[in-house]
Image: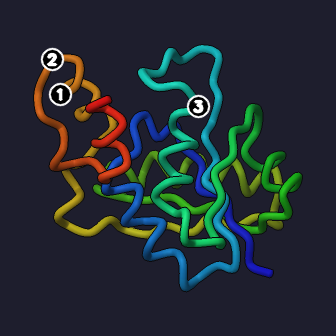
Amino acid sequence: MRICLFPGTFDPVTLGHVDIINRALPLFDKIYVGIGINSSKSPMFSPEQRMEWFNEIYQDEPKVESVGYEGLTVNYCNLIGAKFILRGIRYVSDFEYEKTIADANRTLDKHIETIFLTGEPKFTSVASTIVRDILKNGGDASPFLPDAVIKSLKR
């Protein structure tokens, strides 16, 4: 089975994240969306909320499962049997940063390969940081967000 982990903070889940997952679906038998829990970060949304969004978005897709994890990504990959790490790339600068992490992960475990998918051009401006700024300042972030996220924010 081709199992991958798509790690990130996903704070909040954006259309860019969903785009990467949707385009990875034909490549993998199982995609774990790994919500990294980092004690040094104070996210806007709880890990449970972020998992709930993915569960709602992919309720009809058994290949996608959201999970929370702490610690090294390669260790979690080994725990779930993932031989691939999925990462989305928007810009060349993303690639430089992501390649450094991929190289470190390969040094830690040479059996786990990082796969990069480039985002659709219409989603390149979609970054969780920007979306959080829009939300914090009372703006309408809906053009960047999946329906499941928009609905829960209105509640």
| Residue marked by disc 3 | 47
Q: Residue under circle 1?
A: 134
What's the residue at 82%, 67% (across, down)? 111
Hey, what amino acid is under mark 2? Asn
Residue type, numbered disc 3: Pro
Residue projecting furthest to the front: 155
Q: Secondary structure at mark 1?
A: helix
Q: Are there few (<14), some (14-19), or many (20+) residues within 10 Å of tag 1?
A: some
Marks 3/1: CA distance?
20 Å
Q: Quadrant of the N terminus?
A: bottom right
Q: Residue furthest bottom?
A: 26
Mark 3 vs mark 2: which is more N-terminal?
3
Quadrant showing the C terminus:
top left
Residue projecting furthest to the left: 139
Q: Is residue 68 left or right of residue 149?
A: right
Q: Which residue is mark 2?
A: 137
Here the colouring is: rainbow
Q: Which residue is rendered at x = 60% and y = 54% of the image? A: 33
Given contact means CB atoms under 8 Å apart, are the residues at marks 2 and 1 in contact?
Answer: yes
Q: Earlier in the sequence, mark 3 or mark 1?
A: 3
